[in-house]
Image (cartoon, rainbow, N blue to C red):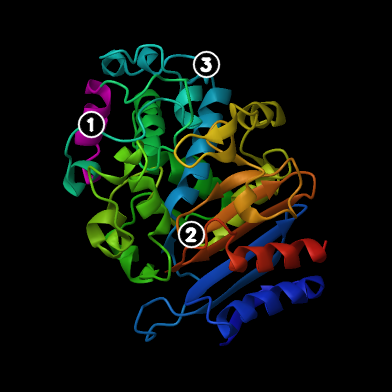
């Protein structure tokens, strides 16, 4: 399988590792991009953007990045915290009064962004149309009672995270989160054509088709056996829903960003340097330090696995192997995608794929190969 793009000669092993993922049958269509010291050192892509293998993955191919969207949303929140428009430690109800209903008046952004809000799913049926239309979902969140005592544990808020963070963004900016992404993050970083929350129909032809692979539903099946399966319902979780136009057009800030590796690596390349790249500052080093301060560091309740969350970022994620430094932060996406900053190594890294695979409890070998090759080149 041919691999395309550019790379610094020092990162030739990364190109080899990327090519091996296709040669070994682990990959269908993907991209990987790396920034070091604010400079792009690799930008590679290959494979196919459709299941039938009739459409080659292109330089500008976009793909649903699932929960890697959460990291971009966490950046948006941090930027608004820096501007004094939001506070991590303030009750969400301060700027979203309806949210105080049924015992939620003390839930803060800190609790929501670290998956401790007791709202890992909805308590009543809601179809995809309600999620797509935004307001039915946030109104249901505002009206319901917590599913368990907020702050008592950490349970991953797979979809609801996006609305718990996104509605505060909308309330204080008077704009949907996708507009904030475009105007305040993507535009200034020069990636306005590479990152979307709410994909315009004119860009739909660039979106890769999701291709579910082996084991992709393993964690879903395991979660159904726990008391915390609420996040799988209302609506029902489906790996192939990103192949529908309605999903791509909607804004779900925890699950349906459309992006490529180049955009994510540039964002995290900036964060690896304290929030600045090419003389554009996203936020101050002090604000970034507060954003990545641990809020939870213990066992996540549904799977009893060690987990460390900051304000929306996963810290030193075990799913990314042992190579990363202790300062690393970012977010993975269901099925393979991942993006992170490693300030100690001055690295911003991103891998995007349309071939969703499950490897739990072992790390995805595609990620490990690419990350290990990256760090070997430093």
Position of residue 189 measured from the top left corner of the image (x, y, whole percent): 58, 49
Is residue 139 shown in magenta?
Answer: yes
Q: Residue at x 16, y 38 (%)?
A: 125
* Of residues 227 and 252, the one drawn nearer to the viewer in this rendering: 227
Q: Quadrant of the N terminus?
A: bottom right
Mark 2 surroundings within 10 Å by alpha-carbon count, few (fewer than 14), some (14 through 19), many (20 or more): many
- Is the residue 239 above or below the residue 171 in the image? below
As drawn, the label of residue 89 is 3
Mark 2 or mark 1: whose residue is earlier in sequence: 1
Q: Which residues are magenta?
A: 132-144
- Relative to residue 136, is residue 283 drawn left or right? right
- Relative to residue 210, is residue 153 drawn left or right? right
Q: CA distance from mark 2 to mark 1?
A: 35 Å
Q: CA distance from mark 2 to mark 3?
A: 33 Å
Q: Quadrant of the C terminus?
A: bottom right
Q: Residue at x 68, y 61 (%)?
A: 34
Q: Residue at x 54, y 24 (%)?
A: 81
Q: Where is mark 2, residue-wise?
A: 194
Q: Residue at x 46, y 32 (%)?
A: 115
Q: Where is mark 1, residue-wise?
A: 123
Is residue 43 shown in magenta?
Answer: no
Quarter occupied by residue 82: top right
Position of residue 294 measured from the top left corner of the image (x, y, whole percent): 63, 29
- Give the mark toward the camera: 3 or 1: 1
């Amino acid at each position: 399988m041919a691999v395309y793009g550019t790379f610094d000669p020092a990162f030739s092993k990364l190109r080899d590792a990327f090519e091996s993922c296709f040669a070994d049958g682990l990959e269908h269509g993907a991209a990987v991009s790396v920034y070091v010291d604010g400079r792009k050192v690799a930008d590679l892509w290959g494979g196919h953007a459709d299941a039938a293998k009739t459409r080659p993955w292109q330089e500008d191919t976009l793909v649903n990045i699932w929960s890697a969207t959460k990291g971009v949303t966490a950046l948006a929140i941090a930027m608004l915290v820096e501007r004094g428009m939001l506070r991590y430690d303030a009750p969400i109800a301060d700027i979203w009064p309806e949210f105080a209903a049924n015992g939620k008046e003390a839930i803060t952004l800190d609790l929501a962004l670290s998956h401790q809000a007791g709202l890992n799913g909805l308590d009543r049926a809601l179809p995809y149309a309600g999620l797509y239309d935004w307001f039915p979902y946030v109104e249901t969140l505002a009206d319901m009672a917590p599913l368990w005592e907020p702050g008592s544990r950490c349970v991953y808020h797979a979809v609801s995270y996006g609305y718990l963070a996104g509605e505060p963004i909308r309330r204080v900016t008077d704009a949907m989160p996708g507009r904030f992404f475009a105007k305040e993050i993507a535009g200034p970083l020069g990636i306005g054509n590479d990152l979307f929350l709410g994909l315009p129909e004119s860009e739909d032809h660039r979106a890769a088709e999701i291709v579910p692979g082996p084991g992709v539903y393993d964690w879903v099946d395991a979660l159904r056996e726990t008391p915390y399966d609420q996040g799988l319902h209302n609506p029902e979780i489906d790996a192939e829903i990103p192949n529908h136009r309605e999903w791509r057009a909607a804004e779900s800030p925890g699950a349906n960003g459309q992006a490529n590796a180049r955009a994510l690596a540039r964002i995290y390349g900036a964060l690896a340097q304290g929030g600045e790249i090419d003389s554009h500052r996203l936020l101050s080093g002090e604000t970034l330090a507060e954003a990545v301060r641990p809020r939870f560091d213990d066992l996540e309740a549904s799977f009893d696995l060690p987990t460390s969350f900051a304000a929306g970022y996963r810290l030193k994620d075990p799913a990314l192997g042992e190579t990363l430094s202790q300062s690393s932060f970012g977010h993975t996406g269901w099925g393979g995608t991942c993006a992170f900053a490693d300030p100690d190594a001055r690295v911003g890294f991103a891998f995007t794929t349309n071939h969703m695979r499950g490897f739990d409890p072992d790390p995805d070998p595609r990620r490990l190969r690419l990350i290990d090759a990256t760090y070997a080149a430093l």
